[in-house]
Image (cartoon, helix red, strand yellow):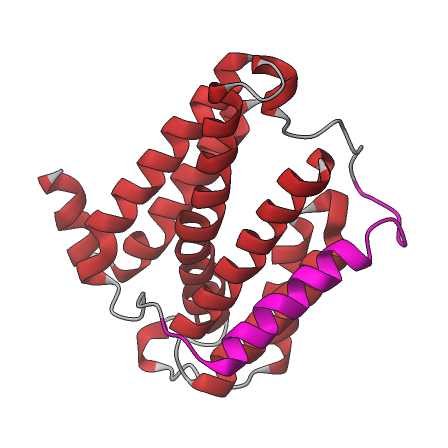
Amino acid sequence: MSFLRKKFESSPEYARIAPFAVFVILTALQGEPNSANSFWLYFVKTLVGAWLLWLARPYIEEMRWKISWEAVVVGVAVFAIWVGLDGYYPRFSKLGDGWNPHKVFGAGSGLAWFFIIVRIAGSAIVVPPLEEVFYRSFLYRYFIRTDFRSLPFSRFHPLSFFVTSILFGLMHPDRWVAGILCGLAYQWLVVRKNRLGDAMTAHGITNLLLGIWVAWKGAWNFW
């Protein structure tokens, strides 16, 4: 733990890249959600992500949640786009059955609902700071200036604006168009508010609404 704290403190890049990179690697190791192990790995991944954020928080000054009416509007709008555009454009990856714990642990079982709650909480609380710090704080500014912390969040750079949003969208190959629009909306919010916290809140609202939608409608392929 002391090693990580020293690395986070000594390297602004490491503090913003490492937690996201570890989360992505653990996601890849998680595999398809067709066994109990994949759900437990998601739980472990969420705990690890939260732990890394806790360790890195003192060294990432912009990672502070902020609430504004713009954040709420963007969060709700992105959720509507994510669901509303689904099926209206080609996918870059095959759409599977999705992340359905009822199928693995039994319909209505306690474990199934436990993992649904874990998924909603993880996507609404842990994922937003991990992704927003990496894409909207680090990558967006690093493409403009390697000394990225000297660049204000309000700086609009068209090439970086679109490139980082496209990269973000391509990380969601099954819904890449919605992902790109999502990235554009969150980055616009960062530039408009000159801070990261509103985008974190908007991202959290989007993922919370999506999680509720998935559990309510049984639309598991959105996960």
3 is within the stretch colored magenta: no
Quarter of the image for the C terminus: give it: top right
Q: Relative to residue 139, is residue 121 depicted above or below?
A: above
| Residue at 69% across, 34% down | 220
In depth, the one of 136 and 79 nearer the eye is: 79
| Residue at 56% across, 14% down | 105
Quarter of the image for the N terminus: give it: top left
Horizontal side of residue 133 vs 91, given as left or right = left
Residue 209 visible in the displayed image: yes
76 is within the stretch colored magenta: yes
Question: Residue 168 location, x and y as percent?
Answer: 61, 56
Residue at the far front: name it: 108
Question: Residue 192 location, x and y as percent?
Answer: 51, 86
Question: Residue 2 location, x and y as percent?
Answer: 9, 41
Horizontal side of residue 111 vs 61, given as left or right = right
Question: Residue 53 location, x and y as percent?
Answer: 29, 49
Horizontal side of residue 155 vs 78, given as left or right = left
Q: Which residues are magenta?
A: 66-92
Q: Relative to residue 87, is residue 107 depicted above or below?
A: above
Residue 61, image quadrant: bottom left
Horizontal side of residue 88 vs 136, given as left or right = right
Q: Relative to residue 124, is residue 122 depicted above or below?
A: above
